[in-house]
């Protein structure tokens, strides 16, 4: 079922990415095409306007001279555009047939449309020649009497521009096709890249829920069985069933601790916990934290020692570091044999400080070190259940250290046991967390 959901989500991501890329490419193509087509006609329209100005010179100016076209005149006025001009009289008849020469046979069917005076138009002649035109009404005061009072249709051939536009369109279509193929590949890659953290998170969540359900089921089952057994002995005294009551109470305490740990991990995943960092005298803080555990260790036939701590201050969240200490000391006590010593050391290393909890217990092998901070992971499952472990403590410890922008690692303790080494920054500027706890 989850695979179907994942595939459906991946398809939706692919389609959304592909549609997005396609719209971008289409919009880009349209913009480039419109701008290019307008740019192609701009020079032609400018040529027509220059020709218009030349044809309609005021009387005080020099007469319009010849250009490389059909009209004669003074060579003093030259302009660089090759144009063709049709001169129409009031009756719509072409009057410059001689000047047009062989071009007349091609252009003779063009009709005068007086309503288009002053407008730029594109026309097709004989079904194959394309012209950009500008119709002008020449005033009677124009120096050139051959055009005075007549209509001038100034024409510029745009077949080269049309051919260039066709080539450009073909290139654009080929380019768009290539980019569409690239967009498909990009969409597939981006959908997989986007789904990767989602699938990873989904997998972790599924594993977490499964492990949590398993951990919760065990103490609940034991408590239920003990209570059901007690219901079969209604006449017994408490002293007669003290062992069963003690087991149920122990499992309820384990259930309470497991629930507390699960809530802590849930807060870590949702990032709803705000930290309260403050400058702390580390020596006094560690002394107050470790002292209650010395009696617990003594009751178990073990020795807990806090090595002399140099006087220094660090910026930290006291509640979270206290919880970290509880986890590390509790872990060391659980896996240390009787008559062993657990040593806690704190020292400054450059701009950071280290907290080391060393025991003389069973140790951690190289294979287990890679996963010891994973949720619900236990080095020895059977022994962890006997000691009440649920595999969440070190995971919470890792989270606390991450909140302080530090590192935690496990290494061998000579000649036997493990050392949990936590490295944290001294300066508040290195962690960047402030505020009050929610």
Image: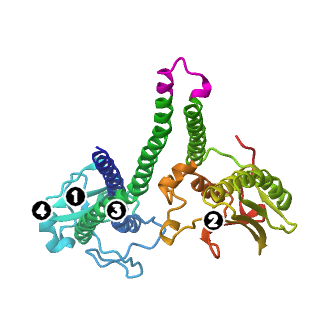
The image quadrant that residue 49 belongs to is bottom left
Q: Which residue is mark 4?
A: 126
Q: Which residue is mark 2?
A: 408
Spatial CA span between label 1 and label 3: 49 Å
Asked if one can make out residue 16 in the rendered structure from this viewpoint, the answer is yes
Mark 1 surroundings within 10 Å by alpha-carbon count, few (fewer than 14), some (14 through 19), many (20 or more): some
Name the colour scheme.
rainbow
Mark 4 surroundings within 10 Å by alpha-carbon count, few (fewer than 14), some (14 through 19), many (20 or more): few
Q: Residue furthest top?
A: 235
Q: Which residue is mark 3?
A: 189
Asked if one can make out residue 86 in the rendered structure from this viewpoint, the answer is no
Spatial CA span between label 4 and label 3: 53 Å
Question: Which of the two labelled residues, at mark 2 and mark 3, occupies the earlier sequence position?
Answer: 3
What is the secondary structure assignment of the residue under circle 3?
helix
Spatial CA span between label 2 and label 1: 81 Å
Q: Where are the magenta residues, as a range? A: 227-240
Q: Which residue is mark 1?
A: 123
Residue 254 counted in the magenta span: no
Residue 228 counted in the magenta span: yes
Question: Which of the two labelled residues, at mark 4 and mark 3, occupies the earlier sequence position?
Answer: 4
User: Percent from the top left, x then y, of residue 247?
Assistant: 56, 36
In which quadrant is the N terminus drawn? top left
Mark 3 surroundings within 10 Å by alpha-carbon count, few (fewer than 14), some (14 through 19), many (20 or more): some
| Residue mark closest to the camera, 2 vs 3 | 2
Vertical side of 361 occupied by 375: above or below: above
What is the secondary structure assignment of the residue under circle 2?
strand
Question: Which of the two labelled residues, at mark 2 and mark 1, occupies the earlier sequence position?
Answer: 1
| Residue mark closest to the camera, 4 vs 2 | 2
User: Percent from the top left, x then y, of residue 309?
Assistant: 83, 67
Vertical side of 323 occupied by 106: above or below: below
């Amino acid at each position: 079922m989850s695979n179907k959901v994942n595939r459906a989500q991946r398809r939706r991501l692919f389609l959304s990415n592909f549609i997005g890329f396609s719209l971008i490419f289409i919009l880009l193509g349209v913009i480039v095409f419109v701008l290019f087509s307008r740019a192609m006609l701009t020079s032609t329209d400018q040529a027509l306007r220059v020709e218009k100005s030349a044809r309609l010179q005021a009387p005080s100016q020099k007469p319009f001279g010849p250009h490389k076209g059909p009209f004669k005149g003074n060579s003093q006025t030259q302009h660089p555009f090759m144009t063709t001009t049709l001169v129409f009289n009031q009756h719509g008849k072409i009057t410059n047939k001689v000047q047009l020469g062989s071009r007349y046979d091609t252009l003779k069917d063009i009709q005068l449309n007086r309503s288009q005076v002053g407008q730029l138009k594109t026309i097709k002649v004989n079904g194959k020649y394309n012209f950009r035109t500008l119709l002008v009404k020449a005033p009677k005061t124009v120096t050139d009497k051959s055009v005075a009072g007549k209509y001038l249709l100034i024409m510029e051939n745009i077949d080269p521009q049309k051919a260039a536009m066709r080539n450009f369109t073909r290139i654009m279509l080929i380019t768009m096709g290539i980019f569409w193929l690239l967009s498909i590949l990009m969409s597939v890659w981006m959908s997989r890249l986007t789904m990767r953290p989602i699938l990873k998170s989904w997998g972790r969540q599924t594993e977490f829920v499964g492990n949590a359900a398993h951990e919760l089921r065990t103490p609940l089952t034991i408590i239920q069985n003990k209570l059901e057994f007690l219901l079969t002995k209604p006449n017994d005294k408490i002293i007669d069933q003290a062992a069963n009551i003690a087991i149920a109470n122990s499992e309820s305490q384990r259930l309470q601790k497991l629930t507390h740990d699960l809530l802590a991990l849930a807060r870590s995943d949702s990032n709803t916990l705000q930290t309260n960092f403050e400058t702390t005298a580390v020596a006094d803080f560690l002394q107050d934290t470790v002292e209650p555990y010395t009696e617990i260790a003594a009751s178990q036939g073990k020795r807990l020692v806090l090595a002399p701590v140099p006087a220094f201050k660090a910026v930290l969240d006291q509640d979270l570091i206290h919880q970290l200490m509880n986890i590390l000391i509790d872990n060391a006590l659980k896996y240390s044999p009787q008559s062993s010593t657990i040593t806690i050391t704190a020292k400054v290393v450059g701009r950071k400080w280290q907290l080391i909890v060393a025991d003389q217990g069973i140790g951690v092998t190289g294979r287990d070190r890679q996963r010891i901070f994973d949720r619900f992971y236990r080095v020895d499952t059977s022994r962890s259940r006997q000691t009440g472990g649920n595999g969440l403590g070190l995971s919470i410890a890792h989270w606390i250290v991450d909140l302080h922008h530090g590192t935690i690692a496990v290494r061998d303790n000579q000649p036997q046991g493990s050392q949990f080494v936590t490295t944290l920054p001294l300066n508040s500027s290195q962690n960047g967390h402030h505020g009050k706890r929610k």
